[in-house]
Image (cartoon, grey):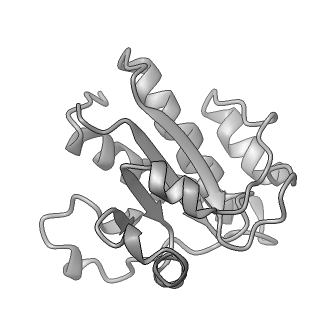
Amino acid sequence: MSVKQILFVCTGNSCRSVMAEGLMRHVLQRAGIDTVSVDSAGVFAVSGMQPTRETQRVLGDAGIDCSAHRARTLTPEMAQDADLIFVMEQFQLDEVLRRIPSARDKVHLLKTYGLATPDAEPNPNIPDPIGKPLEVYEVCFSDIRESVERVARSLGVHTG
Protein backbone atom coordinates (compact mmCIF):
# COMPACT_ATOMS: atom_id res chain seq x y z
CA MET A 1 0.00 0.00 0.00
CA SER A 2 1.57 3.27 -1.11
CA VAL A 3 -0.76 5.49 0.93
CA LYS A 4 0.90 6.44 4.21
CA GLN A 5 -1.30 9.28 5.46
CA ILE A 6 -5.05 9.92 5.16
CA LEU A 7 -6.65 13.17 6.28
CA PHE A 8 -10.40 13.63 6.80
CA VAL A 9 -11.72 17.19 6.75
CA CYS A 10 -15.09 18.67 7.70
CA THR A 11 -16.15 22.07 8.98
CA GLY A 12 -15.49 22.02 12.73
CA ASN A 13 -13.62 18.73 13.28
CA SER A 14 -16.11 17.75 15.97
CA CYS A 15 -18.51 15.41 14.12
CA ARG A 16 -18.04 14.01 10.61
CA SER A 17 -14.26 14.03 10.23
CA VAL A 18 -13.95 12.60 13.75
CA MET A 19 -16.30 9.75 12.78
CA ALA A 20 -14.37 9.10 9.55
CA GLU A 21 -11.00 9.17 11.32
CA GLY A 22 -12.20 6.81 14.04
CA LEU A 23 -13.77 4.41 11.56
CA MET A 24 -10.73 4.32 9.28
CA ARG A 25 -8.40 3.70 12.22
CA HIS A 26 -10.73 0.91 13.35
CA VAL A 27 -10.85 -0.69 9.87
CA LEU A 28 -7.07 -0.53 9.49
CA GLN A 29 -6.49 -1.92 12.98
CA ARG A 30 -8.87 -4.85 12.34
CA ALA A 31 -6.96 -5.56 9.12
CA GLY A 32 -3.63 -5.51 10.99
CA ILE A 33 -2.35 -2.47 9.10
CA ASP A 34 -0.20 -0.11 11.15
CA THR A 35 1.67 1.66 8.35
CA VAL A 36 -1.04 4.21 7.55
CA SER A 37 -1.53 7.33 9.65
CA VAL A 38 -5.07 8.73 9.88
CA ASP A 39 -5.87 12.25 11.05
CA SER A 40 -8.66 14.80 10.81
CA ALA A 41 -9.10 18.56 10.78
CA GLY A 42 -11.70 21.22 10.10
CA VAL A 43 -11.67 24.11 7.67
CA PHE A 44 -13.24 26.34 10.34
CA ALA A 45 -12.44 24.36 13.49
CA VAL A 46 -12.03 25.90 16.91
CA SER A 47 -8.83 24.19 18.02
CA GLY A 48 -9.12 22.17 21.20
CA MET A 49 -12.88 21.49 21.08
CA GLN A 50 -14.04 18.00 22.00
CA PRO A 51 -16.24 15.91 19.70
CA THR A 52 -19.95 16.41 20.29
CA ARG A 53 -21.64 14.07 22.76
CA GLU A 54 -23.60 12.56 19.88
CA THR A 55 -20.41 11.86 17.92
CA GLN A 56 -18.89 10.19 20.97
CA ARG A 57 -22.05 8.14 21.39
CA VAL A 58 -22.34 6.82 17.82
CA LEU A 59 -18.63 6.00 17.73
CA GLY A 60 -18.84 4.43 21.18
CA ASP A 61 -21.74 2.25 20.02
CA ALA A 62 -19.38 0.97 17.29
CA GLY A 63 -16.64 0.25 19.84
CA ILE A 64 -14.58 3.34 18.97
CA ASP A 65 -13.42 5.77 21.67
CA CYS A 66 -12.90 9.34 20.47
CA SER A 67 -12.94 11.03 23.88
CA ALA A 68 -9.28 12.08 23.61
CA HIS A 69 -9.82 13.81 20.25
CA ARG A 70 -9.43 17.60 20.11
CA ALA A 71 -10.39 19.68 17.10
CA ARG A 72 -7.67 21.05 14.84
CA THR A 73 -7.78 23.63 12.10
CA LEU A 74 -6.55 22.48 8.70
CA THR A 75 -3.05 23.75 7.92
CA PRO A 76 -1.06 23.68 4.67
CA GLU A 77 1.39 21.32 6.39
CA MET A 78 -1.37 18.81 7.15
CA ALA A 79 -2.47 18.87 3.52
CA GLN A 80 1.09 18.59 2.28
CA ASP A 81 1.79 15.56 4.50
CA ALA A 82 -1.38 13.70 3.46
CA ASP A 83 -1.46 11.30 0.52
CA LEU A 84 -5.27 11.46 0.41
CA ILE A 85 -7.61 14.13 1.75
CA PHE A 86 -11.32 13.43 2.06
CA VAL A 87 -13.91 16.15 2.63
CA MET A 88 -17.59 15.79 3.47
CA GLU A 89 -19.04 18.56 1.30
CA GLN A 90 -18.27 20.42 -1.90
CA PHE A 91 -17.78 23.73 -0.07
CA GLN A 92 -15.02 22.11 2.01
CA LEU A 93 -13.32 20.85 -1.14
CA ASP A 94 -13.52 24.37 -2.56
CA GLU A 95 -12.14 25.84 0.67
CA VAL A 96 -9.24 23.38 0.81
CA LEU A 97 -8.32 24.22 -2.79
CA ARG A 98 -8.69 27.96 -2.20
CA ARG A 99 -6.25 27.77 0.70
CA ILE A 100 -3.99 25.02 -0.61
CA PRO A 101 -4.10 24.81 -4.42
CA SER A 102 -1.30 22.23 -4.41
CA ALA A 103 -3.75 19.72 -2.83
CA ARG A 104 -5.79 19.52 -6.04
CA ASP A 105 -4.75 15.98 -6.99
CA LYS A 106 -5.33 14.46 -3.57
CA VAL A 107 -8.53 16.03 -2.22
CA HIS A 108 -11.79 14.16 -2.83
CA LEU A 109 -15.41 14.09 -1.71
CA LEU A 110 -15.59 11.12 0.67
CA LYS A 111 -19.04 9.96 -0.43
CA THR A 112 -18.15 9.63 -4.12
CA TYR A 113 -14.57 8.35 -3.88
CA GLY A 114 -14.17 4.95 -5.48
CA LEU A 115 -17.60 4.92 -7.10
CA ALA A 116 -17.65 3.64 -10.68
CA THR A 117 -19.78 6.65 -11.66
CA PRO A 118 -19.30 9.39 -9.04
CA ASP A 119 -21.53 11.81 -10.97
CA ALA A 120 -24.44 9.37 -10.55
CA GLU A 121 -24.51 9.96 -6.77
CA PRO A 122 -27.61 12.16 -6.29
CA ASN A 123 -26.22 13.78 -3.13
CA PRO A 124 -22.42 13.74 -3.03
CA ASN A 125 -22.34 15.63 0.28
CA ILE A 126 -22.53 14.20 3.79
CA PRO A 127 -24.61 16.82 5.65
CA ASP A 128 -23.45 18.25 8.97
CA PRO A 129 -25.40 16.72 11.88
CA ILE A 130 -24.33 19.33 14.43
CA GLY A 131 -27.20 20.56 16.57
CA LYS A 132 -29.55 17.86 15.29
CA PRO A 133 -31.04 14.82 17.06
CA LEU A 134 -29.06 11.63 17.65
CA GLU A 135 -30.94 9.90 14.82
CA VAL A 136 -29.37 12.36 12.33
CA TYR A 137 -25.92 11.50 13.70
CA GLU A 138 -26.71 7.81 13.23
CA VAL A 139 -27.63 8.36 9.56
CA CYS A 140 -24.48 10.45 9.10
CA PHE A 141 -22.40 7.71 10.73
CA SER A 142 -23.92 5.10 8.42
CA ASP A 143 -23.06 7.19 5.32
CA ILE A 144 -19.52 7.71 6.59
CA ARG A 145 -19.07 4.03 7.44
CA GLU A 146 -20.12 2.98 3.94
CA SER A 147 -17.78 5.55 2.38
CA VAL A 148 -14.80 4.74 4.63
CA GLU A 149 -15.16 1.03 3.93
CA ARG A 150 -15.23 1.76 0.17
CA VAL A 151 -12.06 3.87 0.52
CA ALA A 152 -10.39 1.08 2.49
CA ARG A 153 -11.33 -1.51 -0.15
CA SER A 154 -9.97 0.77 -2.89
CA LEU A 155 -6.66 0.72 -1.00
CA GLY A 156 -6.70 -3.07 -0.89
CA VAL A 157 -7.84 -3.39 2.73
CA HIS A 158 -10.20 -6.26 3.50
CA THR A 159 -13.17 -4.80 5.40
CA GLY A 160 -15.24 -7.98 5.92
Q: Name the foreground residue: 40 vs 80.
A: 80
| Residue 142 visible, this angle | no
Q: Is residue 70 above or below residue 113?
A: above
Pinpoint residue 11: horizontal percent, then vertical percent.
67, 71
Pinpoint residue 91: horizontal percent, then vertical percent.
52, 85
Name the residue located 59 percent from the left edge and 38 percent from the top edge: 22
Pinpoint residue 10: horizontal percent, then vertical percent.
60, 66
Pinpoint residue 26: horizontal percent, then vertical percent.
51, 29
Quadrant (top left, top right, bottom left, bottom right) of the N terminus: top left
Q: Is residue 157 left or right of residue 95?
A: left
Q: Name the foreground residue: 13 vs 137.
A: 13
Q: Is residue 158 above or below residue 155?
A: above
Quadrant (top left, top right, bottom left, bottom right) of the C terminus: top left
Name the residue located 53 percent from the left edge and 49 percent from the top edge: 20
Q: Residue furthest left?
A: 116
Count the marks: 0
Name the residue located 21 percent from the left edge and 45 percent from the top edge: 154
Q: Name the foreground residue: 95 vs 142.
A: 95
Q: Is residue 143 above or below residue 24?
A: below
Q: Name the foreground residue: 76 vs 146.
A: 76
Quarter of the rendering containing residue 43: bottom right
Name the residue located 29 percent from the left edge and 62 percent from the top edge: 113
Q: Residue furthest top?
A: 32
| Residue 93 visible, this angle | yes
